[in-house]
Image: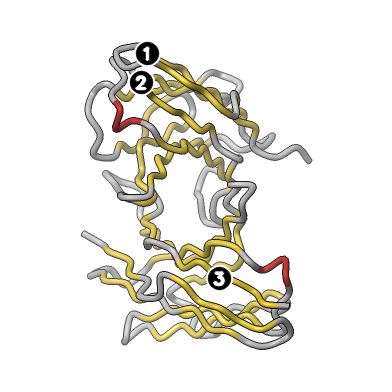
Amino acid sequence: AQTVTQSQPEMSVQEAETVTLSCTYDTSESDYYLFWYKQPPSRQMILVIRQEAYKQQNATENRFSVNFQKAAKSFSLKISDSQLGDAAMYFCAYRSRGYGGSQGNLIFGKGTKLSVKP
Amino acid sequence: KAGVTQTPRYLIKTRGQQVTLSCSPISGHRSVSWYQQTPGQGLQFLFEYFSETQRNKGNFPGRFSGRQFSNSRSEMNVSTLELGDSALYLCASSRWDRSYGYTFGSGTRLTVV
């Protein structure tokens, strides 16, 4: 079974600085998707960035970028120019590319609580 | 474009009762998934529906059930509520192939007393 591990329960960053959140996963599959979701106090999970395992190029969305190391099974999120609105829980998630059985659902890490200091 | 709508936002129920939660997906999304979020267990997959059929199911007891209607709206039901069922229940919708990820609703906070 696949697992996702986020080893940093809490992180703090100064406004305008850069912070990196870590995520490792375990899988025997070669094709899958990885996601970072943000959950602010409003509770809604918001998709931050998405990475397809077969693409070697790291995904980027504005101030958010990932460092995807497939061999190391590592998928870290870098937030540049941190803003107060970035404060939230961040969840790393894995999804198999297949459709059968229990595939297709998201498997989440425990999350990292990010605080942004003004 | 309207997002994923979950109702109600908050719910308080007594142990032993049953509860029904509702989820309206984004227009055009035919896949609806449900997740339970608790401080101890984190986010856990309950089940997924596609075209009114359960496509995947997580490891939850039979007290947890769901269904999907022809308009893709989904409901989940929990019977014989236990204190441990207190959680945030999140609904997520996606395209049929889920390749672009899921769009989540704001959840229903269920408290069992």
| Residue A104 appears anywhere in the view | no
Identify the residue at image location x=50%, y=48%: B97
Q: Position of residue B52 (x, y in %)?
A: 46, 23
Identify the residue at image location x=35%, y=11%: B17
Q: Position of residue A31 (x, y in %)?
A: 37, 69
First in sequence: mark 1 vs mark 2: 1
> The residue marked by circle 3 belongs to what chain?
A
**Amino acid of disc 1:** Gln
Q: Nearer the viewer, residue B57 or A15?
A: A15
Q: Which residue is mark 1?
A: B18
> The residue marked by circle 1 belongs to what chain?
B
Q: Position of residue B100 (x, y in %)?
A: 57, 57
Marker disc for residue B78:
2
Disc 3 element? strand
Marker disc for residue A114:
3
**Amino acid of disc 3:** Leu
Q: Position of residue B88 (x, y in %)?
A: 46, 38
Asked whether the residues under the numbered discs 1 and 2 touch, taking CB atoms below 8 Å apart as contact, a structural biologist would say: yes
Q: Quadrant of residue A3?
A: bottom left
Label 2 crowd (10 A; few <14 / some 14-19 / many >=20): some
- In the rendered image, the quadrant that contains the C terminus of chain B is top left
The answer to whether marks 1 and 2 sit on the same chain is: yes
Q: Nearer the viewer, residue A118 or B79?
A: A118
Query: In the image, A19: left or right of A16?
Result: left
- In the rendered image, the quadrant that contains the N terminus of chain B is top right
Give the Cα distance between marks 3 and 1.
36 Å
- As displayed, is residue B71 above or below residue A66? above
